[in-house]
Amino acid sequence: MTSYVSRGMRFLHPDFDESRLFSGIQIASTGGIALISGDASVRQSILMLLTTTPGERVMRPDYGCNLRQLVFSPNDATTHGLAIFYVRRAITRWEPRVEILFLDAVAGVDDPERMDIRLEYRLRRTGHRESLVIPVFMAEDVS
């Protein structure tokens, strides 16, 4: 019996991947669409989930995370709590391949207009642990 390996199209996210010149779906050297599999596929799916606003996908209007709603909120404990709630709800609903081990949101250490969401998760299939830091840039306070 063969075990299931998750696969998807490889893309570079302009906010998280090093090469920001060529974001989007990647092309393989053979000319076809490059694929990604395993743990990297799950990481990519989480990034896509957390950066998609509900309503963006026509056929799945509930898919996504409401983090963009917080952009004009103050970078304080209340906003951090909402960010944690939104991320936990989105991952629990849309990413059954992972178990959240740690989730926190804090103001950026060197940039007070940035909120850092720290996520540590375990892949259910392999038990492998991964971590991500998702920066959310808050709008400058104009008051």
Image (tube, rainbow, N blue to C red):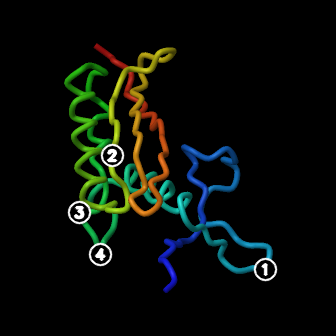
- What residue is rendered at 76% in x and 79% in y? 31
Q: Which residue is mark 2?
A: 100
- What residue is rendered at 39% in x and 33% in y? 117
- Distance from label 2 to label 1 (Cα)? 37 Å
**Which badge, 3 or 1, is on the more N-terminal residue?**
1
Q: Residues within 10 Å of mark 2 (few under 14, many from 20)?
A: some
Secondary structure found at label 1: loop
Residue extending farthest front: 1
Q: Are marks 4 and 3 in contact (CB under 8 Å)?
A: no
- Distance from label 4 to label 1 (Cα)? 31 Å
Pick whichever, 102 or 66, lies toward us.
Answer: 102
Q: Which residue is mark 1?
A: 30
Secondary structure found at label 3: loop
- Distance from label 3 to label 1 (Cα)? 36 Å
Say if 73 sits above or below 29 in the image. above
Secondary structure found at label 4: loop
Q: Are marks 2 and 3 in contact (CB under 8 Å)?
A: no
Say if 8 sits above or below 142 in the image. below
- Distance from label 4 to label 3 (Cα)? 9 Å
Q: Which residue is mark 4?
A: 59
- Distance from label 2 to label 4 (Cα)? 27 Å
Q: Are marks 3 and 1 in contact (CB under 8 Å)?
A: no
Q: Nearer the viewer, mark 2 or mark 4?
A: 2
Q: Are marks 4 and 1 in contact (CB under 8 Å)?
A: no
